[in-house]
Image (spheres, coloured by chain):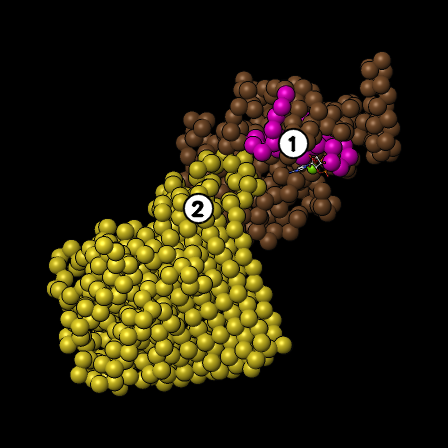
Chain colours: A yellow, B brown
Amino acid sequence: MTAVPMDRLARERYLAEFSELEARLPGTRLPWLAKARRDALERFAETGFPTTRNEDWKYTNVAAIEKRPFPAARVAAADDAVARRAGELALDGAYLMVFVDGHLSLPLSRVTGLPTGVAVQGLAETLEARSDLVEALLAGESCSNGFEALNLALMADGAVIYLPRGVALERPVHVLYLATRDGTASHIRNLILAEDGSEATVIEHYAALNGTASFTNAVTRIRQGNNARVEHIKLQQESPKAYHVAAIQSLAGRDSRFTSHSIALGAALSRNDISTRLDDENAECHLNGLYMAGGRQHVDHHTRIDHAKPRGVSREYYRGVLDGAARAVFNGKVVVHADAQHTDAHQSNNNLLLSREAEVDTKPQLEIFADDVKCTHGATVGQLDPDMLFYLRSRGMEEAQARSLLTYAFAEDVITRIKVAPLRARIEEFLIHRLPEGGSIKELL
Amino acid sequence: MLEIRNLQVKVEGKLILKGIDLKVNAGEVHAIMGPNGSGKSTLAHVLAGRESYEVTEGKVTYLSHNLLELPPEERAREGVFLAFQYPVEIPGVNNVYLLKAALNAMRKHGGLEELDAMDFLKLVKDKMKLVEIGEEFLYRAVNEGFSGGEKKRNEILQMAVLEPKLAILDETDSGLDIDALKIVAHGVNSLRSPERAMILVTHYQRLLNYIVPDHVHVLSGGRIVKSGGRELALELEARGYGWIEQEAAGAARAEAK
Ligand SMILES: Nc1ncnc2c1ncn2[C@@H]1O[C@H](COP(=O)(O)OP(=O)(O)OP(=O)(O)O)[C@@H](O)[C@H]1O
Ligand SMILES: [Mg+2]
């Protein structure tokens, strides 16, 4: 008897799931969407999940996701525990959307008082009422790997944010995704359309009830018109047993600015693909990131910036703190196309290893096809600075406290870039409590 | 207060201190001079507890402690203070909060009550007048972006607040303009007392015009090759180190015979 290979089992499982769910997926009566879903499924059937033979997935093995069934979570009413958790996590002063296992919970959300013309709503409801918006945003959708293909085929819900021309949304939109059920998947699709001159801050916040072993497969597409500003913050604090795969892609117009912060703190395995295309002149992007992992956590960031047109500016700033036997991957690709003269690109990735077994693979990847450009990059992997440690200890500070303090200061350098104060405070609090002797360093900051 | 006997220290496998003997009593100020690379900073760091420096021989007694057995933080709490030749920049760590933590760690260790924010700030502002450092330095990250002279003044401010029993100043005078030098000297002199001792590492006799030492030692090639009173510093200024090194080499030859 020959064993059926794991990848084939996984594909068959998802194909079966698709045929079972197809009729019930949102927008099922829309022919263009039905076709897009089927094409995507076919794509997934061909490729399956990426393997380590694929250069982009060389250091990130997703066999654990492939191996066990993660049927899509069904819609369910939020119970008290979920409502309580959502209440705890909700940020003051923000519009709130809460997704429970990938489905929008209207009772837990509050998005009242939006400026005229602005839409902040669920994907499923948008497909009922304004499918044209979704169609426009999904036009030309290309899935760059099996996860994205599976997402398109099975996407059930997500946040749709529409900003009309010239509208600045003053309060941030806090989109909270709560994973509550073990062994289920959430295929989340978020779509953001920022018309010319509009402005907004969107927080994608992934969290869980204690110890939920779930699989999040999220895709976010952002489109920015001329002079539009989008500040996107992704905070991933899923449970240590969770699997998390996310792709964020922005397309930036003339004079626009895209800022992305990716703060990856949770999950057993997480992978983030963050890419932006500066598609017209004088566009700017800032990609910031902090990953902090311990135990046997694995965290991977693959970023890509395409400078397509002249005078683009990109700044990339990623830091990682790794303890235990954690493993991190950072790959920063910057492509300067032939047309993109006077590009100014800078990338840095600094990693702090707190233990011998922690490991990081960091790789800048610059591909430059224009001649008049300024591109710099730098990557470091190191331990805490012994001179700093000695200086603090020579002033009477306990060694463990000095270590935590320096680790915190290293991470904080990314966190300070987040402008949403209550969120920043929340993350700082989390970091402090994660560090040994954390409480004692609080008054030093 | 401090007694160093036959101290030998290796750095990165290389013997840098080759047998130092030095006795410092409470109330005394000792100046240590000597050519570049002779081991002055190594000695200062070993006394403060730098762990990467390997002590291969010798003993250091401080008050009633076997100093070499204490981790750096405990030495600090017992009253040992090192003003660094190159104060370290620590981004993200607030200068004044560090100072408060340092003072309270010392007070707690000594069985005193910790100071609250108000009392502490009052104390610091008093001391700041002494070293003429602006308040804006308090709220910046430790030494980050400070000029060379500002870093040195910050070290003296820390010393003034912590009131150590044994202060080791490693070239605190280097890179200071004449006004800053006077300020630093004033800070040091105001701490002089019969219960305290100081070790000043310096290249310049100039400092010793303002802080008059009880003893001057010359450290060369990892050994103290000559000791004397303050007049030795004047002689060094006039004649350099060559003659002492020759004298020391002659003495070593005589001993070998
Ligand atoms: N980490 C190190 N690795 C190798 N050698 C070192 C290290 N630190 C110090 N040394 C060496 O030890 C010797 C003594 O250095 P030290 O800094 O103690 O000299 P110093 O007397 O303070 O000099 P200066 O007057 O220039 O400050 C020098 O030769 C120096 O190169
Ligand atoms: Mg020195």
Q: Which quadrant would residue B117 be assigned to in this image? A: top left
As drawn, is A5 to the left or to the right of A291? left
Residue B75, percent from left and from top: 53, 28
Residue farthest toward the top in the current orientation of the protein: B257
Q: In the image, residue A59 lies at what x, y percent?
A: 42, 56
Near-viewer residue (A340 or B165): A340
Res. A358 mark: 2
Q: Quadrant of the N terminus of chain A?
A: bottom left
Viewer can see residue B190 = no
Other-residue count near label 1 (Cα within 10 Å), few / some / many at <14 / 14–19 / ≥20 = few
Residue holding disc 1: B13
Which quadrant of the view contains residue A234? bottom left
- The type of residue carrying mark 2 is Ala
Q: Which residues are magenta?
A: B29-57
At label 2, counting other C-alpha atoms closer than 10 Å, the crowd grade (few under 14, some 14-19, many 20 or more) is: many
Q: Residue at x 59, y 53 (%)?
A: B145
On whether residue B40 falls in the magenta region, the answer is yes
B65 over A382 or under it: above or below: above
CA separation, marks 1 and 2?
Answer: 28 Å
Compared with A282, A15 (above or below) is above
Q: Residue at x 53, y 65 (%)?
A: A365
| Residue ID at (63%, 77%) | A372
Asked if ligand 1 lies within 8 A of label 1, the reply is no
